[in-house]
Image: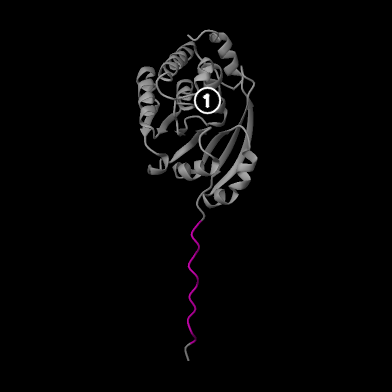
């Protein structure tokens, strides 16, 4: 365990603030994930090296903060999963979910496969591909944690969301400006802003903002124009 980390009672109390309950076994698996991530991060760039000491208290807590917006037994995808954040912590704590971790960089995929094999979550599948090149996945939930700008995120993944599904995007700053700037694109992609939620993260006090977009049902095709026939004489 990385020195200075919270023990199980302290972490369980923090997670409870996010509306979750965590078992000792789940906490132990999160600690294994933390150790794997710290080890691999010395060889490939998964997270900032300065963040090694706060994998548990920031990255994992931040990953779990989105849980309250995910319905029970949802099928979801973590777009640009990278180090498996938020997908792997969510899969460990929310066994009811079925999650796809989508990552296009091969060496990061190797980490995800290694972590998945070690942690053995039955509810995770890894897709080593670019999101925009995959056929529609028909997901209830899409998650994007601090990846590309909003326009690029929308274009790359909207087609994986089924009608009525939610795209949940982690943001910190300038989210209002990004929403305004992409209003036309949202309309064209049939995405409607449903809510913006702010969650203060335990341990760090960071305010995480979640932009929640809902995909509307496709508008019905316009009926063909009535053909007018010339009057017969």
Q: Is residue 134 above or below residue 226?
A: above
Q: Residue furthest bottom?
A: 233
Q: Is residue 198 above or below residue 192?
A: above
At a point 39% along the width and 39% down the height, the residue shown is: 130
Rendering coords of residue 145 (x, y %):
52, 31
Q: Is residue 154 above or below residue 4?
A: below
Range of magenta residues: 220-231
| Mark 1 Cα shell of 10 Å, populated few (<14), some (14-19), many (≥20) | some
Q: Is residue 89 visible?
A: yes
Q: Is residue 164 visible?
A: no
Rendering coords of residue 15 (x, y %):
57, 18
Q: Mark 1 = which residue?
A: 63
- Camera-side residue of 228 and 44: 44
Q: Is residue 202 left or right of residue 29?
A: right
At a point 41% along the width and 34% down the height, the residue shown is: 102
Q: Secondary structure at mark 1?
A: helix
Query: Main SS of the magenta segment?
Result: loop
Image color mode: one colour
At a point 37% along the width and 33% down the height, the residue shown is: 127
Rendering coords of residue 167 (x, y %):
52, 38
Q: Is residue 14 left or right of residue 221?
A: right
Rendering coords of residue 199 (x, y %):
63, 27
Q: Is residue 112 magenta?
A: no
Q: Is residue 76 above or below residue 31?
A: below
Number of numbered labels in the structure image: 1
């Amino acid at each position: 365990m990385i020195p200075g980390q919270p023990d199980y009672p302290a972490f369980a109390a923090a997670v409870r603030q996010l509306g979750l309950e965590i078992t000792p076994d789940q906490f132990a698996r999160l600690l294994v994930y933390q150790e794997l991530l710290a080890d691999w991060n010395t060889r490939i760039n998964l997270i900032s090296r300065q963040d090694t000491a706060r994998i548990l208290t920031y990255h994992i807590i931040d990953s779990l903060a989105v849980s309250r917006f995910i319905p029970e037994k949802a099928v979801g995808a973590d777009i640009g999963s990278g180090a498996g954040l938020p997908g792997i912590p969510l899969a460990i704590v929310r066994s009811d979910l079925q999650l796809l971790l989508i990552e296009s960089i091969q060496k990061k995929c190797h980490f995800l496969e290694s972590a998945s094999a070690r942690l053995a979550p039955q509810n995770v599948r890894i897709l080593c591909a670019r999101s925009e090149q995959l056929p529609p996945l028909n997901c209830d939930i899409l998650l994007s944690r601090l990846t590309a700008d909003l326009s690029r995120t929308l274009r790359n993944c909207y087609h994986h969301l089924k009608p009525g599904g939610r795209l949940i995007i982690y943001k910190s700053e300038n989210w209002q400006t990004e929403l305004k700037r992409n209003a036309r694109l949202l309309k064209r992609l049939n995405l409607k802003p449903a809510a913006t939620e702010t969650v203060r993260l335990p341990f760090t006090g960071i305010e995480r903002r979640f932009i929640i977009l809902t995909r509307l049902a496709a508008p019905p095709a316009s009926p063909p124009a009535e053909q007018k026939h010339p009057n017969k004489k």
